[in-house]
């Protein structure tokens, strides 16, 4: 079965460039603004969209994304409402892949089978669930694959050659390489180290490799994209959004443009660098 992720990365390979993968938190700062941002992302230059599922204990996330999740929860965002937002996004955007990123607890509470049925119906293409290791594949990974939903695994600087095959087993869509040791937004990615790590991963898999955690500028995204199939940017977009909120944490007229303007700059950086490298 060919998924939207498979199709998108095949298209980009023909174009000779990497993807810009953007992360935003569903419901931040409210559901309506969140949906407006999502609908604007493809036109701004996002090739793949990761949507955060807000959770009360996001252990892999730094302060920016933690705060975004808390704003979303305060605004009443639930997993059911997140799927509704995806469905509304998908009604006008049939091609751009959507990956839900988060933690297992909300999915477990929702019910795995029901969640997968509803996620597939809403137009979700993939899942990144950061607290489910390969040893727990029967919990969600295998059922997701059977449902036609890609399951994307994280590899990190500490994932050695002995561990890597286990991480890559049952992974589909792409491999997400975490460029730093630590939480999101806590440091900058080193493109030389990223290049070496991506080359090592590619010795074990033919899947596209996307790199995230520590990419904040168009220049950094371009340098990282040179080594892989996708640059993932999240905390920088969250920070851009946060900077436009009023004293009560509400969206302003600047909120959506702040995010989309940065996405456009990031997209230009990624595409321009790859074009120059041909």
Image (cartoon, rainbow, N blue to C red):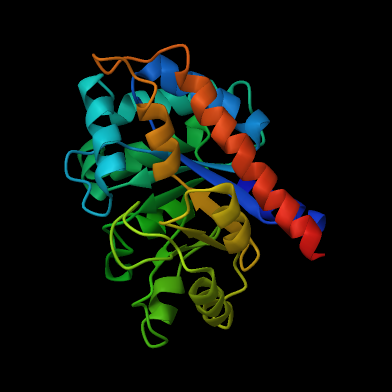
| Quarter of the figure that contains the N terminus | bottom right
* Residue 227 vertical position relative to residue 196 in the rendered view, above or below: above
Q: Which residue of the protein is positioned furthest toward the bottom in this rendering?
A: 162
In the displayed structure image, the side of residue 143 where residue 71 appears, left or right: left
The residue drawn where x is 36% and y is 78% is 159
Examine the rendering and report whether any part of residue 275 can be seen. yes
Total marks in image: 0
Task: Pick whichever, 272 or 40, lies toward us.
Answer: 272
* Residue 16 vertical position relative to residue 80 in the rendered view, above or below: below
| Quarter of the figure that contains the C terminus | bottom right
The residue drawn where x is 34% and y is 23% is 81
* Residue 239 vertical position relative to residue 146 in the rendered view, above or below: above
**Where's residue 254, x and y in %?**
47, 17
**Where's residue 243, x and y in %?**
37, 27
The residue drawn where x is 36% and y is 82% is 163
**Where's residue 22, x and y in %?**
51, 42
The residue drawn where x is 55% and y is 56% is 220
């Amino acid at each position: 079965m060919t998924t939207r992720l498979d199709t998108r990365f095949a298209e980009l390979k023909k174009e000779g460039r990497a993807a810009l993968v953007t992360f935003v938190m569903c419901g931040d700062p409210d559901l309506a603004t969140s949906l407006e941002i999502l609908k604007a992302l493809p036109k701004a230059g996002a090739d793949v969209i990761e949507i955060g599922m807000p959770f009360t204990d996001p252990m892999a996330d730094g302060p920016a994304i933690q705060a975004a999740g808390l704003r979303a929860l305060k605004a009443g965002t639930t997993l059911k409402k997140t799927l509704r937002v995806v469905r509304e996004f998908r009604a006008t955007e049939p091609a751009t892949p959507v990956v839900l990123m988060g933690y297992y607890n909300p999915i477990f509470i929702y019910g795995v089978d029901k969640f997968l049925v509803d996620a597939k119906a809403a137009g979700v293409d993939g899942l990144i669930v950061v607290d489910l290791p390969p040893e727990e594949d029967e919990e969600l990974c295998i059922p997701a694959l059977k449902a036609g939903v890609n399951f994307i695994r994280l590899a990190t600087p500490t994932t050695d050659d002995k561990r890597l095959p286990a991480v890559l087993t049952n992974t589909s869509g792409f491999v997400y390489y975490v460029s730093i040791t630590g939480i999101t937004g806590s440091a900058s990615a080193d493109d030389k180290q990223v290049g070496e790590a991506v080359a090592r991963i590619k010795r074990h898999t033919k899947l596209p490799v996307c790199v995230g955690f520590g990419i904040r500028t168009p220049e950094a995204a371009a340098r990282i994209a040179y080594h892989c199939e996708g640059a993932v940017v999240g905390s920088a977009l969250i920070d851009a959004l946060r900077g436009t909120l009023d004293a009560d944490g509400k969206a302003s007229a600047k909120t959506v443009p702040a995010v989309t303007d940065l996405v456009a700059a990031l997209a230009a950086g990624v595409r321009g660098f790859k074009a120059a490298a041909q």
